[in-house]
Amino acid sequence: MTPDSLGEEGFLRQVRSGLTIRFGPFRICLRSPLLEAARVFRRLYPDIKLEKDEGIRDFHVEVFPPSGVRRWWRPQVEFRLDGEKPFEPFPRDHAFPLFEWGLNYAIATRAHNYCLLHSAVLEKNGRCLILPALPGSGKSTLCAALMLRGWRLFSDEFGILQPETGRMLPMPRAIPLKNRSIEVIRRFEPGALLGPLFPKTRKGDVAHLAPSRSSLERQGEEGKAGWIVFPRFVPGSSTLVSSVSGSEAFVRLSNNSFNYHLLGEIAFRALTDLVRESECHALRYSDLDEAVAMFDRMVG
Amino acid sequence: MKADSWRIPFPDELLLEEWENAWMLYHRGTGETHLLDALTVEILDILRSNTLSTPTLAEELARRCQRSADAEWQARIGTTLERLEFLSLVERQR
């Protein structure tokens, strides 16, 4: 059963009563009476498999209008995680971005059985490309472009490293494109499946790119690290790759992790192994097509 | 006046990983990770199994590095030891 196969009415009913979905290693129960947010979800995840409403759910997520008279003159929406409200309410028409960001918050603050890198991760030929998120990296745009050219999306936001096995775990979800990136990706791939534009959110204008169907279908398949590439978008620059030392890659990755300090020695060992088994590079780029071609050459 | 001596109170708390041009050290005692250079790693290596004064340690390091233990060298080792003390990696004994 998928959102598509349920039909719009059936899906909206299901979301209202509680929907169980799997994103990579996490099972999530989502409940919302907000039709517009559910419609956006269905548009971006038409083929995600819906699971039975039983067993353990890692996160119980609710996206609800707050109670009180305020909702009549200034419609708002709030995110509840296992019954708690970690954020101030958002404008009601930002319900879907709030769901996505709220779920990121849930994972970043609670999933400490994994070493969580703030990175995009994609896979090709069984090996993973890790793109750490640093200011000015253009990580989401690059990630979107690679997925649209056939790379399997693991995640735009989380490098989920399983410390016991050293394997990367996929968690393909919609990619939030911001501001100019939206138009860049529209031009890059006119057939890309994008959700509606959410103007003036707390992160600027946002539109979500749907994860590829194959990424969702294969979200149970883990991957081995292959490359760690620190991208930097520099307007007007040519595509330039340089190698990064292991110690520098380690420092940059550990500083970029959501829970390195919390995991301590486990993370130290896991990141050491991850860097040792990866080729580490820095990439300076301005042309998306060139950057994608460079990554394809790198894979061989 | 007797010079201060230095030691590593719990050597097993130091996990060292060597890279091509540097060392990463995880300190179980504080949960902190440090990026170290070769000289600092030599100091820790010696103090893992010895308690030594600054001059004695400087002499041993000078021998390993094949240079003289002059005043500048002694001062450099002293400064490095104080940094390591600040990071709780070594302990001073007066």
Image (cartoon, helix red, strand yellow):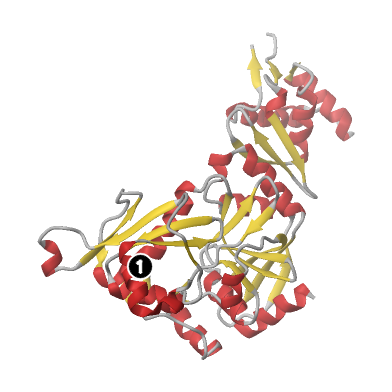
Pick the residue in front: A2 or B41. Answer: A2
Residue matched to label 1: A14
Q: Answer whether residue A132 is visible to the viewer in this image.
A: yes
- Hey, which residue is sitting farthest top in the picture? B1
Residue drawn where x is 60% and y is 49% of the image:
A254
Give the vertical position of A255 relative to A133 (above or below): above
Pick the residue in front: A155 or A43. Answer: A43
Residue A265 x/y as whole percent: 64, 37
In the image, A1: left or right of A125? Answer: left
Residue A156 x/y as whole percent: 54, 67
Residue A126 x/y as whole percent: 74, 67
- Which of the chains bears the disc numbered 1? A
Pick the residue in front: A105 or B62. Answer: A105
Give the vertical position of A42 relative to A169 (above or below): below
> Residue B50 falls in which quadrant of the image?
top right
Answer few, some or many: residues within 10 Å of disc 1's Cα (few below 14, many 20 plus, some between 14 and 19).
Answer: some
Residue A93 x/y as whole percent: 27, 73
In the image, A198: left or right of A110? Answer: left
Residue drawn where x is 72% and y is 54% of the image:
A275
Give the vertical position of A162 relative to B27 (above or below): below
- Which residue type does callout 1 highlight? Gln
Pick the residue in front: B26 or A18. Answer: A18
